[in-house]
Image: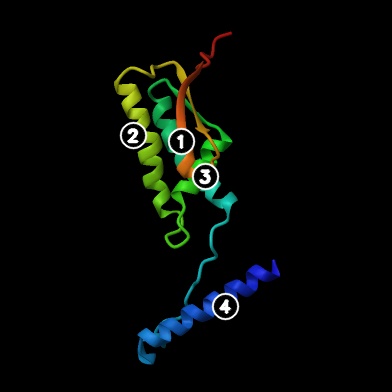
Amino acid sequence: SEDSESNYDRMKQKVNDELKQHFRPEFLNRIDDTIVFHQLRENEILSIVDIMIQRIETQLRNKDMGLELTDNAKKYLAKKGFDPVLGARPLRRTIQRDIEDNLSERILFNELTPGQIVVVDCEGDPENIDKSKLVFRAGKPMPTGQP
């Protein structure tokens, strides 16, 4: 939209002004271009969550298990793992802490066993991460490929 473009132009100008304050012109003349990235939108962050979860799904599939995240669980992770300053970088740690560590403990203590699909949902409002939490439950059995 036009408003986001003007915000982007202002941000790019501010970055260039900061560069001029911190670096000598001789150095700046050696730089071909500066790239200022647009801030990630919610749908892009949710796509990153999907990509990161696919890796965990593959690991579980190798253990004869499946993983399903509800849309609310994905929204919770996106909200908790996104930082306006750092972008999606903290998302990896959030998924590791909230999903992988939890799954590992449950598998270790035999709460989840091969042949199950693990369903992860968000209890509460996924937009309010302080008043909500992820819940894990053993879902339906994995399909066996036989009729």
- Mark 3 and mark 4 in contact (Cβ < 8 Å)? no
Q: Residue at x 50, y 71 (%)?
A: 36
Residue picked out by circle 4: 10
Residue named by callout 2: 101
Nearest to the observer: residue 143 or residue 126: 126
> Looking at the picture, how far across and down is residue 143, in whole percent?
53, 16
Classify the position of the C terminus by image quarter: top right
Secondary-structure class at tag 3: loop
Q: Rounded to the nearest whole Å, what is the CA distance between mark 4 and mark 1?
A: 38 Å
Sequence-first disc among 4 and 2: 4
Task: Say which of marks 2 and 1 sits in front.
Answer: 1
Nearest the viewer among 35 and 45 is: 45
The residue at the point 53 percent across, 75 percent down is 11
Categorize mark 4 by other alpha carbons within 10 Å: few (<14), some (14-19), many (20+).
Answer: few
Q: Relative to 46, does residue 17 appear above or below in the rendering?
A: below
Q: Residue at x 36, y 31 (%)?
A: 102
For the residues labelled 2 and 3, say whether their Cβ atoms are less than 8 Å apart.
no
The furthest residue to the bottom: 25
Amino acid type, callout 3 = Asn
- Please provide percent x and percent y for residue 25: 39, 91
Q: Indicate which disc, 4 or 3, sits on the residue closer to the N terminus.
A: 4
Q: Mark 1 belongs to which amino acid?
A: Lys
Q: CA distance from mark 4 to mark 3?
A: 31 Å
Which residue sits furthest front? Answer: 131
Q: Circles 1 and 3: CB distance less than 8 Å?
A: no
- Residue under numbered circle 1: 133
Judged by depth in the image, the label closer to the viewer, 4 or 3, is 3
Cα–Cα gap, marks 2 and 1: 15 Å
Q: Which residue is mark 3?
A: 128
Name the element at disc 1: strand
